Image: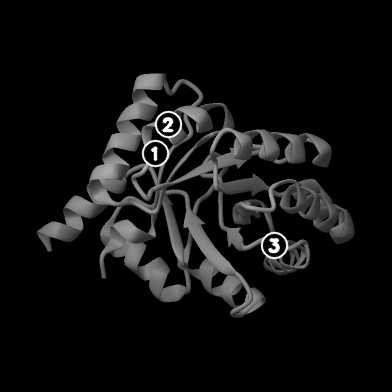
Amino acid sequence: MRLARYIDHTNLKPEASAEDIKKLCDEARRCGFASVCVNSSRAALASECLKGSGVAVCAVVGFPLGAACGEAKAFEAAAAAHSGASEIDMVINVGLIKDGDDAAAEEEIRAVVEAVPSCVVKVIIECCLLSDGEKRRACRAAMRGGAHFVKTSTGFSSGGATVADVKLMRQAVGDKMRIKAAGGIRSAKFARELIAAGADRIGASKSIDICAEERAE
């Protein structure tokens, strides 16, 4: 298994400079990562750096809280796509899931999907804040809303990816959606465990270390 092709090479730090993003893109081009994942304001820079490389640009939307209104998320997604992003990782409104208002969460997801018809949309459900039942409902809302992936975590809350959550998400969506595991993934061993559990993509900021570990095995 070559892990690089699974990895969204990530820098979402608010203090990330233009030079940091250029470095991220250079590493992604060199290693052959699936994408770079950046804040939406850096989508244009990443797109320019990666032109012709085959590495996708993924932009986060409503990040990291997911509590912005749906219209704002749709606008941000469209702006990121206009700047060159071909993948959008949006944060679900966790409060709506907690409220039991799955229809409103679904409507918000659909608004983002419809705003970026040429993009792959991943919905971050922030598993660490949800019960197992809420995780299943969030996955189903993302599926009904037309998203392509569900994603475990932002990496900015109280917990990250777990094998148990990936398995639960796979059970919830079956083969109808793909799954991205992110948050706290720092080793090749853990990345492989998440893939074996059902993850199709890995979000990591320690991607270089993960691939170095894989090569050394």
Which mark is in front, 3 or 2? 2
* Residue 63 placement, left or right of 21: right
Specify the label residue 48 is tagged with: 2
Image location of residue 29, percent across then percent down: 29, 43
Q: Callout 3: few (<14), some (14-19), or many (20+) C-alpha neighbours within 10 Å?
A: few
Amino acid of disc 1:
Lys
What is the quadrant of the C terminus in the image?
Answer: bottom left
Image location of residue 111, percent across then percent down: 80, 49
Q: Secondary structure at mark 1?
A: loop
Q: Secondary structure at mark 2?
A: helix
Q: Secondary structure at mark 3?
A: loop
Query: Which sits earlier in the primary sequence, circle 3 or circle 2?
Result: 2
Query: Which sits earlier in the primary sequence, circle 1 or circle 3?
Result: 1
Amino acid of disc 2:
Glu
* Residue 8 placement, left or right of 70: left
* Residue 80 placement, left or right of 209: right
Q: Please name the colour scheme applied to the rendered image.
A: one colour
What is the quadrant of the N terminus in the image?
Answer: bottom left
The residue singled out by tag 1 in the image is 51
Measured Cα–Cα span from mark 2 to mark 1: 5 Å
Quadrant of the rendered image containing residue 136: bottom right
Q: Residue at 31% of width from left, 47% of height from top?
A: 207
Amino acid of disc 3:
Ser
* Residue 14 placement, left or right of 172: left
Residue 158 visible in the current orientation: yes
The residue singled out by tag 3 in the image is 131
